Amino acid sequence: MSSEQFRGGENKSINSRARLGVDLKFEAIKKIAETNFKVRDLSNISMINSFSPPSVFIGSKLKYPEVNVGILSPLEKDENSWIYDDAKYWAENNFEINQVLHLRNSLLNSRFKTKVTDARMNKKFLDIIKDVAVSSKPVELEIELKNRIQLGHEKDKVLAPLGMNADFEKAKIIGNVQINRHLDKILNDELKVSESMKILYENNFDEYSLSKILSVGILGLKKDRRLVPTRWSITASDDIIGKQILKKVQEYKWLEDYELFYEEFMGNQYLILMFPNVWSFELFELYFPGSSWNPSAEIKASTDFEGFEGRTKYAFNTAGGYYATRLPILKYLDSIKRQASVVVIRIETPSYWASLGVWVVRESVKKALNKKIKFSSKKELLDSAKGISKRQYQFDVDDVLKMSKLIRNINLQKNLIEYF
C-alpha cells in the first residue's frame, strides 16, 4: 500500500470516528428533547431496568463516617448510557450548558446508607457498587426502589449535578462485568493508594476513572480501605496524579520561550502564562457578577500559590479548581520535558450560569493548552496577555498581574542577578 493510500485510509478512519461522535451527540440531544416532552409520573416508578454509564456516587452530606452510596443510571434503558457521565466527550464535542444539565438531570442515584469502613467487608450491595465502579463498559442493572424518586440537586463547585435520587431495596447486575486486566491485578496487591494510582495512571487510566475507583475503597492496604466521598476523591485524584508528575517536571530544564495560552469554554475564559524558570504555580479565579457563584454586583476573586516544592496544605481559596487546573498544566510540561513558572487567570462570566462541577475547569484548561503563542521576552508575554484579555475578554488583567506573587518573585530574582 502506498503512503498516499495509507494516509487516505487513516483519514477516512478519523473522519468516520468524527462522524460517529457527531451522530451520537445528535442522538443524545434528540433523546433529551424527547424525554423533556414526556410527562412522567415518577411516583409510580418502583423498578428500574437500565444501564449505568458505569458510574457511582458516594455522598458526603450525612454525618461522617456514614455516607450514601449510589449507582447512577438513566431511567430509560440506553446502551449508550456512557454519554451521561463522560465529561471529556462533552468537552471535545462542545456541548452547551443546558445539554449537560439535561443529561445529568436524567440520571437517577439509587442509593443506600453505610459506613466508610464497610469497604473492608463483603457486603452484597457494596460488592455491586464496586463491580459497577471497576467496569470498563456500561453495566446492565435491575433495581427495586424502596421509596419515591426525589427531584432536585444542590449547586456544587466540584461535583457534576444529579437530577434524581431514591433509596433502593434490591439491586442486581445482569450479565458479566468487564474489568481491565491492570486494575484486576492491582485489586489483589497490597499496595498503598498512591502506588496503585501511579501504576494505573501509567496504564492509561485517566483522572476520571481513577477518582471513581478511589471512591469505592478498593485501593490501598486492605486494613486501611474505606469509601471516599466523590467530591473528595475527585480532588484527591487530581492532587495525587499531579504530585507524581511534578516530581518529573522538577527535574527538567527550564522552558526555552515565554508561552501564552488562551481559550474560552462554557463561559469560562482562561489566560495561562508560562515563564522560563523553576516550577511554581499561581491561580487567580475571578467571578463576574451574574456568573454561577456570584449573584452580587461586584467582581469576586480568589487565589492560591505554590513554590518549587509544591503545596503542603489544601488550597482553601480556589479549592478543587486549583488541583483541576494544575493537573493538565503539569501533563503539558511533562509532555514537552520542561519546567516553568505558571500563572493562570480564570474569568468566570455570566455565560457560565449553572455550576456543572470541576470537570469544566479541567477541560477548559486542556482546550486552552492547544492554543499557544511564543515570545522571546517577559515584556512581550505580559503585553500580549493584557492585549488579548482586552480584545477577547473585554477585561483588563493588569491589576491581577500586579498582584501576582509569582511574577513578583521572578522580578526579584532578575534584580538580584543583575545586582550581583
Image (cartoon, rainbow, N blue to C red):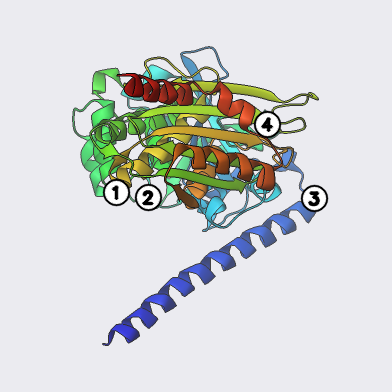
Q: Amino acid at mark 2?
A: Ser
Judge from the rendering whether residue 246 lies leftward or rightward of residue 403; answer left or right: left
State the mark number for residue 153.
Answer: 4
Residue shown at 53%/58% (left/top)? 80
Measured in 3D between alpha carbons, the distance from the residue under mark 4 to the one under mark 2, in whole angstroms, is 27 Å
Comparing 375 with 46, the one in front is 375
Q: Amino acid at mark 3?
A: Val
Q: Nearer the viewer, mark 3 or mark 2?
A: 2
**Mark with earlier residue (1, 2):** 2
**Mark with earlier residue (1, 4):** 4
Q: Which residue is mark 2?
A: 136
Measured in 3D between alpha carbons, the distance from the residue under mark 1 to the one under mark 2, in whole angstroms, is 7 Å
Circles 1 and 2: CB distance less than 8 Å? Answer: yes
Measured in 3D between alpha carbons, the distance from the residue under mark 3 to the one under mark 2, in whole angstroms, is 33 Å
Q: Is residue 386 above or below residue 224?
A: below
Q: Which residue is mark 1?
A: 180
